[in-house]
């Protein structure tokens, strides 16, 4: 598995903060969006197109693994939970260096809340299982047909554009839109500017403007297909 540096994550978070609405989101939430964007940038062999049967098998396996981990979390005994809590509190103590030392009662209160991190993980697993059940397989096939095979940069650009559009919409609460010059065809607006900066941050070759137009055409085609 490829990894990305904290410097790359921070650079994207800084970019997200330039968007209107970013002030309403936590740093952790912005970092999560940055990690997702970086992940889709890393084009690996597993990102290549697959048959419908392979896709179904992979999703079924994902659900089975999520359900298995959920069952394991729910079966943890108190000593295991306590061991996790100790490591969790060590990290918290490091983060809170310089703050007043906590009392034993405060530490006990923290222990009683130990299941919160596990609860968050359990909720994420539940959401994943639910999301798999909602996947529109026909939409997946339409998107697959739009991919340019054997062109890693094109695939990365397509993936990043789609995810960047979702992040842009989530942060700004506005759909990705743009205006274009009637003579030069140059696109303008917050969305094209944002995508251009994302491409620059992720070293994606090609024109962000052309991707903006292609994204708009694809979205329009999907709306017409569903009408």
Image (cartoon, rainbow, N blue to C red):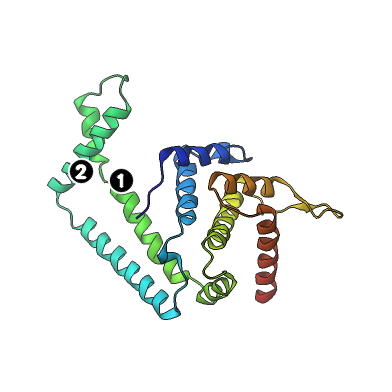
Q: Earlier in the sequence, mark 1 or mark 2?
A: 2
Which percent across, then down, holds residue 77?
Answer: 14, 52
Residue at x 35% of width, y 73% of height: 60
Residue occupying the point 32% across, 71% down:
61
User: Which percent across, then down, holds residue 132?
Assistant: 42, 68
* Residue for badge 2: 84
- Give the residue displayed 80% in from the left and 55% down from the top: 185
Q: Are marks 1 and 2 in contact (CB under 8 Å)?
A: yes
User: In the current view of this chain or complex, which residue is farthest to the bottom?
Assistant: 53
Above or below residue 34? Residue 185 is: below
Q: Residues within 10 Å of mark 1 (few under 14, many from 20)?
A: few
Where does the C terminus fall, quadrant-wise? bottom right
Direction from residue 1 to residue 24 in the image, left or right: right
Which residue is painted at 59% across and 71% down in the image?
Answer: 146
- Say the numbered circle drawn on residue 117: 1
Give the Cα separation between the discs numbered 1 and 2. Answer: 10 Å
Q: Nearer the viewer, residue 12 or 116?
A: 12
How crowded is the residue under tag 2: few (<14 C-alpha within 10 Å), some, or many (20+)? some
């Amino acid at each position: 598995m490829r990894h990305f540096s904290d410097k790359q994550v921070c650079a994207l978070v800084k970019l997200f903060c330039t968007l209107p609405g970013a002030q309403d989101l936590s740093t952790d939430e912005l970092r999560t969006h940055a990690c997702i964007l970086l992940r889709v940038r890393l084009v690996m062999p597993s990102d290549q197109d697959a048959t419908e049967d392979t896709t179904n098998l992979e999703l079924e396996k994902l659900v089975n693994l999520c359900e298995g981990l959920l069952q394991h979390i729910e079966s943890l005994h108190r000593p295991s939970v306590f061991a996790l809590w100790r490591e969790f509190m060590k990290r918290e103590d490091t983060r809170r260096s310089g703050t007043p030392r906590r009392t034993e009662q405060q530490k006990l209160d923290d222990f009683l809340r130990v299941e919160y991190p596990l609860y968050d993980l359990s909720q994420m697993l539940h959401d994943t299982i639910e999301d798999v059940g909602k996947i529109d397989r026909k939409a997946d096939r339409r998107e697959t047909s739009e991919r340019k095979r054997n062109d890693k940069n094109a695939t990365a650009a397509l993936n990043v554009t789609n995810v960047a559009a979702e992040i842009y919409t989530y942060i700004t609460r506005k759909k990705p839109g743009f205006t274009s010059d009637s003579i030069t065809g140059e696109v303008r607006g917050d969305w094209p500017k944002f995508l251009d900066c994302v491409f620059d941050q992720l070293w994606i070759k090609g024109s962000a403007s052309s991707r903006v137009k292609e994204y708009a055409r694809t979205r329009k085609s999907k709306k017409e297909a569903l009408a």
